[in-house]
Amino acid sequence: MNAQPVTLQGRHVRLAPLQADDATALAEVGLDPALWQWVPTPMHDVADMRAYVDTALAEQARGVALPFTIVDVGSGRIIGSTRYANIVPEHRRLEIGWTWLARAFQRTAANSEAKLLLLTHAFEALGAQRVELKTDALNAQSRAAILRIGATEEGTFRSHMIIPGSGRIRDTVYFSILASEWPAAKARLAGRLLPG
């Protein structure tokens, strides 16, 4: 399993390898406080977004992450970001996360198609055996979305992390999709993207 930068093209979105100079475009759509309500590291300004991008690229250089920008195909504009993370090649395991979209693109085909592109590449090109997803236990919208794509809820890591700033102790819910479950999950996700 060798996760290298790649562009993943869909009808609604394109996932492009994250570049250092994407920070400004990401900040233009990503400094909405509502986007970071459930994220341990909120974004307040362009400097925060630059640090976010720098961290993602440093993790890519270490071989444990592969970050993307999410680009709206219609306008060609960056509308968010996502990544493979916690990549463990020897166990053919990775995580999909750090996903956020500009509010105007939430509850559209953008997130479903981004997940379909990432999961297809993970299972069918990289040969993943397991894809993990996780979210804050209080984030009901994210939990429901992860279940809708066909993931199985595996359990809750209690008192998993302390949120910077607020000091709130976060419980984290873990989900997974296995290679054997991918065909059914793929059909479900593809069905959600059909017109009508």
Image: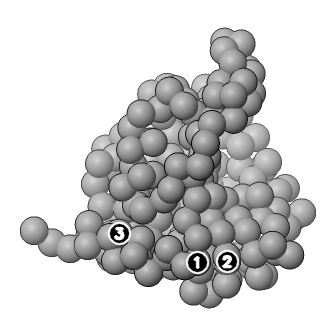
Outermost left residue? 196
Q: In the rendered structure, which disc, 3 or 2, sits on the residue that comes first in sequence?
A: 2
Percent coordinates x, y for residue 79 in the rendering? 44, 53
Work out how far the residue at label 3 is from the one at label 2, CA to CA, in angstroms. Answer: 18 Å
Q: Residues within 10 Å of mark 1 (few under 14, many from 20)?
A: some
**Tag 1 and tag 2, C-beta contact below 8 Å:** yes
Please determine whether, in this image, residue 180 is positioned above or below residue 74. below
Q: Residue at x 49, y 76 (%)?
A: 182
Label 2: element kind:
loop
Name the residue tied to disc 1: 179
Percent coordinates x, y for residue 118 in the rendering? 54, 70
Name the residue tied to disc 2: 128
Q: Residue at x 58, y 59 (%)?
A: 176
Please determine whether, in this image, residue 81 is positioned above or below residue 172. below
The quarter of the picture where residue 86 lies is bottom right
Outermost bottom residue? 125
Q: In the picture provided, is 112 more to the left or to the right than 53?
A: left
Q: In the picture provided, is 174 more to the left or to the right than 71?
A: right
Q: Residue at x 58, y 71 (%)?
A: 178
Q: Amino acid at mark 1?
A: Ala
Work out how far the residue at label 3 is from the one at label 1, CA to CA, in angstroms. Answer: 15 Å
Label 1: element kind:
helix
Q: Residues within 10 Å of mark 3 (few under 14, many from 20)?
A: some
Name the residue tied to disc 3: 189
